Amino acid sequence: MRVLVVGGGSAGWIAAATLQSRLNGTGPGRVAITLVESPDTPRIGVGEATIPTIRDMLRGFGMAEADVMRACEASFKHAIRFDDWSAPGSRYLHPFHRHRSPDMQTAAARWLEGDGALPFDAFASAQPALITAGLAPRALDGADYQGPVPYAYHMDAEMFADALAAHCVARGVRHLRDHVDRVDRDAGGLVTGLALRSGQRIEADLYIDCTGFRALLSPQAHQPGGWVDQSRHLLCDRAVAFRVPEDPERFVPLPFTRARALGSGWCWDIGLMTRRGRGYVYSSAHISADDAEAELRAEEGAAASGLTARHLRFRVGRQVAPWTGNVVAIGLAAGFLEPLESTGLYLADYAARVLCEMFPPTPAHVANPALARRHNQLLAEVHDDILDFILLHFAVAGRRDTAFWRDASAPQRLTDRLAHLLDIWNVRPPRFSDFSLRYPPFNDLNYEFILLGSGWRPAGLGRGRGRPDLPPDAAAANRAIAAGLPTNAALLARIHGRPGATRP
Ligand SMILES: Cc1cc2nc3c(=O)[nH]c(=O)nc-3n(C[C@H](O)[C@H](O)[C@H](O)COP(=O)(O)OP(=O)(O)OC[C@H]3O[C@@H](n4cnc5c(N)ncnc54)[C@H](O)[C@@H]3O)c2cc1C
């Protein structure tokens, strides 16, 4: 079977590495994989925050954790911190860890009985205390990808794609640097080959479209019937970003993504080993590109002066059928949700894994409608599931001080499913049975961090009187987790070989 991945951004290399590791193993196998990447069309160059599933992905590729982290200037991520979402000065965390002891099965209901003095995130997770203490998520000499709490990374997107590329090429993936000038199709719409700028023509049995927002091999992505437009739910459609250099000898990146609400959207602050990534995700209906850039520069302060900003446009939605004929779109070509919960790379990883599950046994099965239909169904479900989770942040945000926040939180933005869930949660806190997916990327435990962090309470439930003490087993778990952990600075210094970066 010949597979041709078109596009060498993070999605293209994730697809190539997933097919290689799952279908071929460590060397050449039954699937001949080629990746063609334009030398002239740059990658999108953003996509710096991840979620914990990335550790399983990298482990599955057979990459050593320290090698990946060094190659991508990566730091650790315990959580996302949402600043100013409820009101100026408010903040809450969405950590990855959650206590699972019997006493904590009803953590939300228990916490709601209290006076709220102890934030819900610190009540239900060990990670807020680790962040306050400056501790890392895993031990100094711990096994790769393993720690007492789940964790993810912040990393340089370009370097990440390059690291995956080197890994894939070493394992037998063929890499062509050439620009696809023309996509040839037969009368039935199946792709028959690609004409490259060098004059070469290449053919495959299965084509993977990872050409980003261009979706070069997926004409249906640009037609109304082939695209599910979700911009009525999520208003942000642009971003402006710049990189703030930091002194590598002194800088210790924060172990969480900071997502601060601004006037017409929100901005990220992501610390890598030598710089911070800054970006403002905003709604073009509410602010101009120039004003958004000025607002982000003002938020950063003096360090932003002289830095070059990049402006990006995106559309929120997904292809109806990312697997159409003999083409499977993965990554931005398949769809996009704004990056509030760092789900872009996860969606590419998930799509590549689903493709392996559905992988056609012979070239004759590539355009098999049954395989394609199941693939498309699974991808639509998970994409729409994440849409609801991101939408929740805006729906329960307390801010109403600008037109954007009033529009973004309006009831008509809700999907039917999220409106129904919020009706249920007006009666009681979320439960696992509220979710239908077998492995939802975000479940009741994640929703609770956002709901309770935002100040949501079931209708008619007044503020409790007592301060809910941390149950003894959760307090003991917090102590046991922290006891074995080095400082974040010490672990990063060890991994990156930077003795200077030891400031706690
Ligand atoms: C503002 C913003 C912030 C984001 N933040 C995050 C985040 O924090 N976390 C996260 O997980 N995700 C994030 N994402 C999503 C993430 O950036 C993408 O999911 C990820 O980078 C994958 O992109 P891609 O590979 O699909 O596309 P791209 O990076 O755009 O790659 C496209 C590839 O196609 C190639 N190509 C295009 N045309 C041709 C042609 N004619 N011939 C040959 N090759 C061609 C290009 O050369 C390139 O290699 C963010 C996205 C945006 C817009």
Image (cartoon, rainbow, N blue to C red):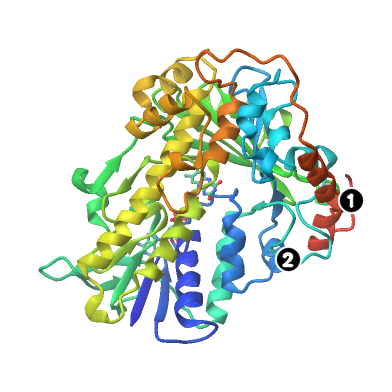
Location of residue 19 (image quadrant): bottom left
Ligand 1 within 8 angstroms of badge 2 C-beta: no
Pointer 2 with pointer 1, Cβ within 8 A: no
Residue beneath label 1, please? 502
x and y percentages locating residue 472 in the rendered image: 80, 38
x and y percentages locating residue 465 in the rendered image: 71, 14
Residue drawn at (41%, 78%) of the image: 33
x and y percentages locating residue 11 in the rendered image: 46, 60
Question: Which amino acid, by three-letter code, is at mark 1?
Answer: Thr
Can residue 182 be spotted in the picture?
A: no
SS at mark 1?
loop
x and y percentages locating residue 345 in the rendered image: 51, 54
Location of residue 411 (image quadrant): top left
Q: Is residue 88 left or right of residue 168?
A: right
Location of residue 297 (image quadrant): top right
Question: Which amino acid, by three-letter code, is at mark 2?
Answer: Ala
Q: Which one is nearer the viewer's eye here, 396 or 72?
A: 396
SS at mark 2?
helix
When the figure is inspected, residue 319 is found, relative to residue 285, above or below; the finding is below
Q: Which mark is residue 66?
A: 2
